[in-house]
């Protein structure tokens, strides 16, 4: 496994985990139901986990770094807009 893949996955996790929490908070604000918040968190975490595994194994380098940049930008926008 190449080092750049591990670095990209760690950066994805560093930006993705707070993004999951932000998504859960937005779901709580919109619906005020704990079931919806739990489902939103579980779906976002599983998507993040699967994306990390795919990044570690088969995605090409350019696409991997684009995904990391998009997730980091989405986190930044959600935190600033929140």
Image (cartoon, rainbow, N blue to C red):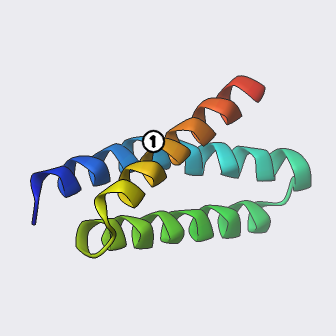
Comparing 57 with 62, the one in front is 62
Q: Examine the rendered structure and indicate whether residue 62 appears above or below residue 79.
A: below
> In the rendered image of this protein, does residue 65 appear above or below residue 77?
below
Quarter of the rendering occupied by the C terminus: top right
Q: Quadrant of residue 29?
A: top right
Q: Residue at x 57, y 51 (%)?
A: 20
**Left or right of residue 46, residue 75 in this image:** right
Q: Position of residue 42 (x, y in %)?
A: 58, 68
In the rendered structure, the answer to whether residue 46 lies left or right of residue 8 reads right
Residue at image coords 48%, 49%: 16
Residue lying farthest right? Answer: 31
Q: Report whether residue 53 is seen.
A: yes
**Label 1: which residue?**
15
Estimate the x, y position of residue 34 in percent, counting from the top left: 76, 61
User: Does any portion of residue 82 appear in the rendered image?
Assistant: no
Taking the spot 43% from the left edge, 68% from the top edge, the residue there is 51
What residue lies at 67% left-to-right and 32% top-to-bottom? 77
Please tell me whether mark 1 sits on a helix, a strand or a loop: helix
Quadrant including the N terminus: bottom left
């Amino acid at each position: 496994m190449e080092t750049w893949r591990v670095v990209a996955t760690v950066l994805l996790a560093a930006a993705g985990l707070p993004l999951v929490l932000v998504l859960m908070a937005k779901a709580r604000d919109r619906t005020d139901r704990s079931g919806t918040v739990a489902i939103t968190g579980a779906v976002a975490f599983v998507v993040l986990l699967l994306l990390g595994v795919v990044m570690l194994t088969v995605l090409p380098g350019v696409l991997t770094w684009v995904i990391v940049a998009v997730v980091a930008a989405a986190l930044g926008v959600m935190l600033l807009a929140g």
